[in-house]
Image (cartoon, rainbow, N blue to C red):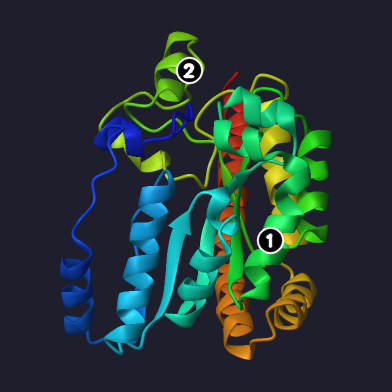
Amino acid sequence: MNCEFCSVTAFNGYKYRKRPVEDVLDELQMVPQKRVFFVDDNIIGFGKQDEERAIALFKGMIERGIRKEWFCQASMNFADNEELLEYAAKSGCRMVFLGVEAESTGALEEVNKKLNLKIGVDAYEEAFHRINQHGIAVLGAFIYGMDGDTPEKLRHRTDYILNSGVDVMQITYLTPLPGTRLFNRLKDEERLLYTDFPSDWVHYNMTEATYKPLSMEIEEFTDAIGKSSSRLYNRRTIWRKFVKTWRATKSFTTAMWAYNSNLNYRNVALGRKKANNALSYATDSLGASSSSLG
């Protein structure tokens, strides 16, 4: 994986390091909590051998009687292997985080999202459907703010999310994290809004704009995010997604996982809206003060 915005490879390198399956199973047996999150950036790895290792892990959980409900992160090809999906579901998988990023080829090319380009945006829905058929919800992560993005394109991305088979909706500002090629490029182009480090790292949390967009004004960008959040995280939309997930997965438990996750993102979005409103008020007040002093 070599996405321009990815901080995982910047911090950890490109090598996929694997722990022995038996060690992972031993650790899982010591975890008292029923719900588990596998923090691996991609639980199925890369290639056939890594997929077989993931299947061995899931089978091991079943054979040892490790009764967990779990959530993981994976690449879009998580849906390609029916055996993998079968044993993931049987071992307790309820939800998978997929970095969808965007619904257009142009946006994916901008950030060098090669795997998604290889799969093809037209194949997304079939992937979501195959995952749902095994009783697993899809958390689709989308990025707003590529250089080619305009308010109109962001509205289209929001339309896509609303009408797609995605069960849980995550939208974030494209964020130039330290060490990434994206950060270095935007720094060289003098487009970063916050450069007083380390104190300014607090802004790089994926919930606010940290650079000057290329194809729209900063106010248009934040306004587009706000409007998209209102459409995605209103209670009616979240309820509709809950019903969709229940029908698609035939699992009330999975649907509740998705529903609660969407409520959590709603809380984040509402907090972001309040922060943006406060920033707007402060900016307006500053402008009024400056005018009066002038």
**Label 2 is placed on what type of residue?**
Leu
Local SS, label 2? helix
* Nearer the observer, 135 or 7: 135
Q: Position of residue 82 (x, y in %)?
A: 58, 65
Image position, residue 19 (x, y; %): 19, 56
Q: Which mark is residue 128?
A: 1
Distance Cα–Cα, label 2 vs label 1: 33 Å
| Rendered image: mark on residue 85 | none
- Residue at which label 2 appears: 186
For the residue marked with disc 1, what is the amino acid? Phe
Residue found at x 59% / y 36%: 283
The quadrant holding residue 32 is bottom left
- Eye-nearest disc, 2 or 1: 1
Q: Residue at x 18, y 60 (%)?
A: 20
Q: Position of residue 121 (x, y in %)?
A: 73, 41
Q: Tell me if mark 2 has few (under 14), some (14-19) or many (20+) residues whose alpha carbon lies within 10 angstroms of its own.
A: some
Residue 95 vertical placement versus 253 (above, below):
above
Closer-to-camera residue (262/231)? 262
Mark 1 element type: helix
Query: Residue at (72%, 26%) from the top-left corner?
Result: 106
Quarter of the picture containing the N terminus is top left
Q: Is residue 114 above or below residue 252?
A: above
Q: Say which quarter of the image contains residue 155.
A: top right
The reply to whether residue 275 is in sight is: no
N-terminal of the two: label 2 or label 1? 1
Crowd tier of the residue under label 1, counting other residues whose Cα lies within 10 Å: few below 14, some 14–19, many 20 or above: many
